[in-house]
Structures are given as C-alpha cells and as structure tokens.
Amino acid sequence: MHDIVYLESDLAIESSESMPEWVLTEKTAKNIAVVRRMKTLENVVPIGFRGNERTKRFAALTPLDNIQKVITPEQTAFGQIPKSHEQTIVHLRQLCRGIRWGIGGSVGFTMATGIHACTEESDIDVILYKERMESLKPLQRLHEQVQQLNHQVDLQVEVANFGACLLNELVTSTTVLLRTGTGVFLVQRDNLFRSN
C-alpha cells in the first residue's frame, strides 16, 4: 500500500477500463504507479496512475515481475523535500522520531520521484505503521501536535494484517471506517485495540 513502483513495461498493465492517453505520456504516470489497497490474485499487484491533475487517475493491475523498483513511504519520508513543504516536513520528522511512518500522496510522490506533483497548498499524507494498536494517548498527542503545523497533515494509521483508518477519526470518534483489502467497514474504535 502506498508504495511507488517503477514498471518495466506499460504493455503488462490490465484494467477493466481503456487506458487513457495521458498514462503513456505524462511524466507523473509514464511507467510509474502507486500500489493500491485491493485483494488480488497471487503475484498480481493493484496499481494506480496519477496524472498532472487531480481528476486524472487510472486504476489497473500488473504482474509482480513487471515491477523494476519499489520506493516505500518510509523511504520517501527522508527524500528531497519540496521547498513549499520544507518547514512542515522537518517538524514531522521530529514529531515522528521513533515511530514507523512514511509520506504518501502528491507530496510523497514528489519526494520519491523528483517529479513535481504537488502544489504549495497540497496536504501531506502521512502513514503511521503499527503492528498492533496499543494505546490511544500517544496517537491523541500526535494528532494535537500536527494541528499546529503550517500545512494540513492527513494521518492514516496502518495496522499490520488488519487495515487502515484515519487518525482524526480514531481520536475523535467511537466508530471508525476501517479500510481493508476486501472493502471498507464501520467498526467500534475499542475493537481495534482488542482485536490485535
């Protein structure tokens, strides 16, 4: 999930939709995709292409052996920061010290590939990786701290072998939307802490 992948060939891309021309021509899409959350067959990877506009998105599948290179959000978090987001990301690096985390979205794409895909106002999508949910307090504290940063920071908590939810929902609501490979489910927050 959220990994950026470089593909060997655009001929090994399958989709139920016809491939838009921009997937083959725009720098942000040409043989570069992002891994999506979706249950698939073994050795098949669900990917998505991003164009140079928000409305340009294309979902597809590719065989595992078509992937040449993988850049994880964790690697991206320590990549070259876009000038427009430098102060915020430097603060994030300090706040997330000692935590498994990474950056996704347009800012993460820019940091990982060197291809400019974000604007000065772009939100920063942060993924926190947890083996299990242990305590809500540190997450509440982090949520409060990121509210003070210059850019909007959207934090998602990814729990191993379970799914992902938005940190904002996790700390402000007793129910959360849990995104999994098989769909999205409304669950009681307390169950996330009991189930793993």
Image: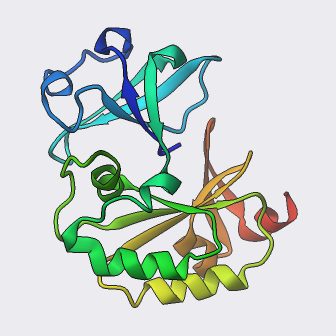
Is 42 left or right of 28, judged from the image as shown? right
Q: Relative to the observer, which residue lies in front, 140 or 9?
A: 9
16 sits to left or right of 40: left
On screen, residue 68 versus residue 97, left or right, reads left
Q: Which residue appears at 25% of the width and 15% of the height?
A: 18
Q: Which of 62 and 67 is in front in this view?
A: 67
The residue at the far top in this view is 11
Quadrant where the C terminus is found in the figure = bottom right
- The residue at 64%/70% (across/down) is 99
Q: What colour scheme has been applied to the protein in the rendered image?
A: rainbow
Viewer-proximal residue, 110 or 128? 110
Quadrant in the rendering for residue 106? bottom left
Please give left or right for residue 147 compared with residue 21 in the image.
right
Tell me which residue sits at (61%, 55%) in the image.
Answer: 164
Write down the quadrant of residue 69 in the picture: top left
- Residue 195 horizontal/vertical position (percent): 85, 58
Residue 59: % across, % down: 36, 29
The image position of residue 131, as x and y in percent, is 76, 57
Give the total number of marks visible in the rendering: 0
Q: Is residue 195 above or below residue 189?
A: above
| For residue 74, above or below residue 137 | above
Is 145 drawn above or below residue 179 in the view shown? below
Measuring from the top left, give residue 6's x and y in whole percent. Answer: 37, 29
Quadrant in the picture for residue 29: top left
